[in-house]
């Protein structure tokens, strides 16, 4: 949930700097952990990002990419031990 909160803030901020105000931002997150280990570390995290608004798919995809690759401290911390996958959907269509 930490990665969803962190990246959500980044994505909205990146779009807002471009004078884009998404109407909706919703995320689904699924984490996969090593079972029978203590601590049970994540080895993969899958995120689905749902955006709605009147802006280009390229801007939606770029904002998400910048968040995960550069700005989100949670994803930058987790990327050392977990593969982070994300999909972006704008107005119901995967971009």
Image (cartoon, rainbow, N blue to C red):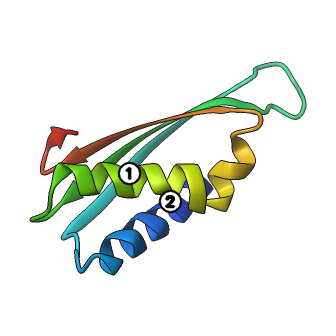
Q: Which residue is mark 2?
A: 7
**Helix, strand, or loop for circle 1?**
strand
Residue at the spot 9% in from the left edge and 65% down from the top edge: 54
For the residue carrying disc 2, how many other residues have a C-alpha within 10 Å: few (<14), some (14-19), or many (20+)?
Answer: many
Q: State the residue lying farthest toward the top.
A: 36
Question: Cβ–Cβ below 8 Å for labels 2 and 1?
Answer: yes
* Image location (x, y in percent) of residue 71: 58, 62
**Helix, strand, or loop for circle 2?**
helix
Q: In the displayed structure, would residue 47 be above or below residue 64?
A: above
Earlier along the polypeptide chain: callout 2 or callout 1?
Answer: 2
Residue at the spot 38% in from the left edge and 58% down from the top edge: 63
* Image location (x, y in percent) of residue 57: 19, 50
**Residue 1 in sight from this viewpoint:** no
Distance Cα–Cα, label 2 vs label 1: 10 Å
Front residue (pair 50, 12) = 12
* Image location (x, y in percent) of residue 89: 23, 44
| Quadrant of the drawing holding the N terminus | bottom right
User: From the viewer's perspective, is 57 left or right of 54?
Assistant: right
For the residue carrying disc 1, how many other residues have a C-alpha within 10 Å: few (<14), some (14-19), or many (20+)?
Answer: some
Residue at the spot 83% in from the left edge and 19% down from the top edge: 36
Q: Which mark is residue 27?
A: 1
Q: State the residue lying farthest toward the left.
A: 54
User: From the viewer's perspective, is 79 left or right of 86?
Assistant: right
């Amino acid at each position: 949930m930490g990665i969803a909160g962190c990246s959500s803030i980044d994505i909205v901020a990146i779009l807002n700097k471009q004078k884009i105000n998404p109407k909706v931002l919703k995320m689904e997150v699924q984490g996969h952990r090593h079972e029978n280990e203590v601590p049970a570390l994540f080895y993969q995290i899958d995120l689905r990002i749902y955006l709605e608004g009147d802006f280009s798919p390229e801007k939606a995809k770029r904002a998400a990419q910048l968040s995960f690759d550069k700005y989100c401290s949670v994803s930058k911390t987790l990327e050392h031990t977990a593969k982070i996958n994300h999909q972006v959907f704008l107005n119901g269509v995967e971009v």
